[in-house]
Amino acid sequence: MAFKYIGKSLIRPDAVSKAAGKAVYLDDIRLPGMLYAAILRPEYAHAKILSIDSAEAERSEGVVRVVTGKGCTFRYGDNIRDLVPMAVNKVRYIGEPVASVVADSAYHARQAVKKIKVDYEPLQVYTDALEAMKPDAVLIHEENGSYWTLPGIKAVPDTNIAMHYHLKKGDVEAGFAEADTVVEGEFDYPLASCAAIEPHGAIAWFHEDKTIEVWSSSICPFIIREDLARSYERPVSDVRVHIPEIGGCFGYKSDITVEQTVAYVASFVPGHPVKWVASRREDFTSTLLGHGIRTRMKIGAKKDGTLTALKTSVYHTTGAYADTGCNVIMAAAHNSTGPYEFPHCDLEAYSVYTNTPAVGAFRGYGHQESQLATERLMDMLARKLGMSSFALREKNYLRPGSVNALGERMYKSNGDVTACAEKVRKAVFGTDKPKADDRYVYGRGFAALMKSPKGAPFSSKGCYLKFNIDGSVSINMGGAEVGQGLRTVVRQVAAEALKIAPERIRVYTEIDTQFSPYEWQTIGSMFTIQGGRAIIRAADKAIRMLKRTASQVLRCDMDLLEYDGEHVFLRSDPEVKVAVKDICRGYIYPDGITVGEIVQTAADARLPRYSAPDPETGQGSMGVTYTFGAQACELRIDRESGEVIIDHFASTFDVGRVINPMQIRGVVVGGVVMGIGAALKEKLRFDADGICENPRYSRYSLPRLEDMPGKQTVEFVETPGEIGPFGARGIGEHPLLGVAPAILNAIYDAVGIDFFAIPVTPAKIKAALGKEGK
Amino acid sequence: MGERISLTVNGRLHTLELEGWEKLLDILREHLNLTGSKRGCDDATCGACTVVLNGEAVKACVTTAKKCAGGEVLTIEGLADGEKLHPIQQALIEAGAVQCGYCTPGIVMELYALFQKSPGAEDEEIRKALSKHLCRCTGYEAILEGALSAREAMRKQAKA
């Protein structure tokens, strides 16, 4: 299939305004009469609130109102309704909102909030799932088990276990009985922050006419709208949510979190827009975190390397609220098989309340955490069996006809992991490894990977398509552009589908629930697949409308007509034609009489037949579309300092179809560096009292330019999928998934030490080298 | 308590009444409504607020107002010539270095200050300048590539 616009490196439509400094992000918005909120955070991570004295704060300069959680009667959330907008009687983590000051400037609000005095009665603090799930643990939520939940979420009442999920395929005992050998281990993917450079924030405005207007740096405007409407008992149509430019997301600006707090504060000063933007400290401790996942895994295999059984237990330090974390660990359980077929699986996950900030989405959503275990254990198994790790993997890859843990059958259109593995093997292992020298020792490591979207049965994305009177086209969708480049994808897919040059297709900028078509939320690397399909459907409808009008004008049947972007014409005699620009708002005859419709269409797309889990087995159609890939690296370790230097990192994904080569390389290269941060540098540390030790960029070590690999090889396999536009699949999260295991496998290759927890810092390497006497 | 300062921003002279606590970033964003300079961290770590003060790239989030008194500030808003972007902006766009765009203004101004002082800056100098900036999207590859091609574009422009 030859494409005109797909596969071209078009420049993103928002690049100019961003480079010019004119793109408007949340904190750049100024509204008439705007007030500013500052929020008080507790001194304890788990405590009863005995009293709050706000008298001095109320007298402070510029203060309009002081707000506390006293009297707040509702809970919110879209999976488990366990969240409160502001602490009521009790605080559960160190970043929780306790009180808020609304003032005429952010500075005055911040000054006044320091003057609020709170008496607390401290309670036992838990910062790790394994401690908090002990039977005698103090309850963080006495109400656990009584909250409203989506179907399929089961709490264990009178414990801190907010959700227990269990997925069974076959008979795992029988599977281990068949095994000749077993490998097992416990792996730790610690708490971390997405840490986008733009901090999270929101503006809320309760209007006099009872409508509510919100702006947020969020990827979930429609979730925010529905949740606020429920909390404040308004029709959903009376809540309007705007999404300006977003300065990076990587997961944590999803669901509904800070918007509920800002709305709660604003509800006390109706008539005034109230803005709150997180300080960097608040962005670390008062928005969603990522990971916090311990994975215990056991793999059984026959002598020849055939896998027989997988047992996975995921323990999640989910934080003070579980609404946003419960689906992450479901994904961690589903996808802990990695890209392999196990005939027998027993995969379970516990989402456990702890006195740490709530965990939510982090680019990769449960996959990289449990697949760190899978990919490290596959290397260990190969060693134990005395097999090549490539041959071991190759023998067990999911391929057409295989059935995954969820019970879904694989088809060729799911993609080709073997082809991906072969490309990165050649790229990294195709030459001789450098020999160790006085300073450095070298290693190479590999990881294969599998990504599912972790969507939902109702995860639709909509598209409004409008032909303008000159034949140019406007496309309006609800997908949040966070930097991943979805506007470019929209433009290219629409151009291809409509056969119109991209310069004549204008893609939406702001999302506004008043004008934008419905979109569930822009998560799970699903936009290209579902959004792209929605565009094609909307384009097909538009072309049908054009043909319908043309059939009247040209006086022939519709099925005899062709469309080429500029004209609709008779297939058998292309000279019989009418220009698109002359029929896109109806055709106007010389006497002024007009026939035909204005060409503006709506369409949507969801993942086909996505289901809820079966109550017995936990299985179901909960992946629907998969993307496979493989990653490998060559690194060297400084014997003196323990520093790891990545010389070469290679990634290959079967994305079905590359839509924009420059942009997709950018997504992969950036994702790999983010993964390097996770593997070697990043951890948000909480002490035993639940106090965060490093909530600043200067103490939370994000990768910088000097952490770039010496070279990145990025390649693609293109086995078309059946759902996405022109065969395309998602890519947003995938580049992170294999990074940590590839690096840890390479570290083993270099120094013969198995690491089970990240980040593997130079200090840890030095300590391990010392211990081993290496 | 209050203080009065004058400074020139993007060629325009401003006289401001301040409370005394303000940093340059507060002046730009809150007083002058120049929101192109971004707030990312407040501890001079991310570089998103970088502007040029008296020819030097500075982090506006920690630069006191006092230090700016009588000074000349250039921000991202002052760089393009109408619709015509500066070669640094253009080069970053073409290299694919703009993703979410939040770090972009700071990086552009960092490079501008560098190339004003040292038009033929060595690769190592460019890397060092970029090392002062955090970007969570790109993995830095395209930013470095954009910076190198900006240097070429500015060289050509200087010759012409």
Image: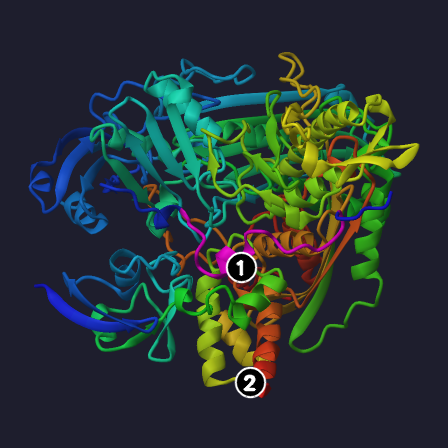
Q: Quadrant of the N terminus of chain A?
A: top right
Residue at 41%, 48% (x, y): give it.
Answer: A25
* Chain ID, mark 2: B
Q: Which residue is mark 1?
A: A761
Label 2 CA crowd tier, 10 Å (few <14, some 14–19, many 20+) = few
Whole-percent x, y for residue A45 in the image: 30, 37
Q: Quadrant of the C terminus of chain A?
A: bottom right
Q: From the viewer's perspective, is A702 left or right of A748?
A: left
Marks 1/2: CA–CA distance: 45 Å
Residue A67 in the image: state x and y as whole percent: 19, 32
Q: Which residue is denoted by mark 2 in the rendering? A: B158
* Main SS, magenta residues: loop
**Which of label 1 and label 2 is nearer to you?**
2
Q: Is residue A391 magenta?
A: no
User: Which range is magenta?
Assistant: A6-25
What residue is rendered at 66% in x and 27% in y?
A591
Q: Secondary structure at mark 2?
A: helix
Discs 1 and 2 carry the same chain letter: no
Hey, which quadrant is residue A231 in on the image? top left
Amino acid type assigned to the residue bearing label 1 in the image: Thr
Residue A157 in the image: x percent, y percent?
Answer: 43, 15
User: What number is the disc on residue A289?
Assistant: none
Residue A329 x %, y %: 56, 31
**Residue A178 falls in image quadrant:** top right
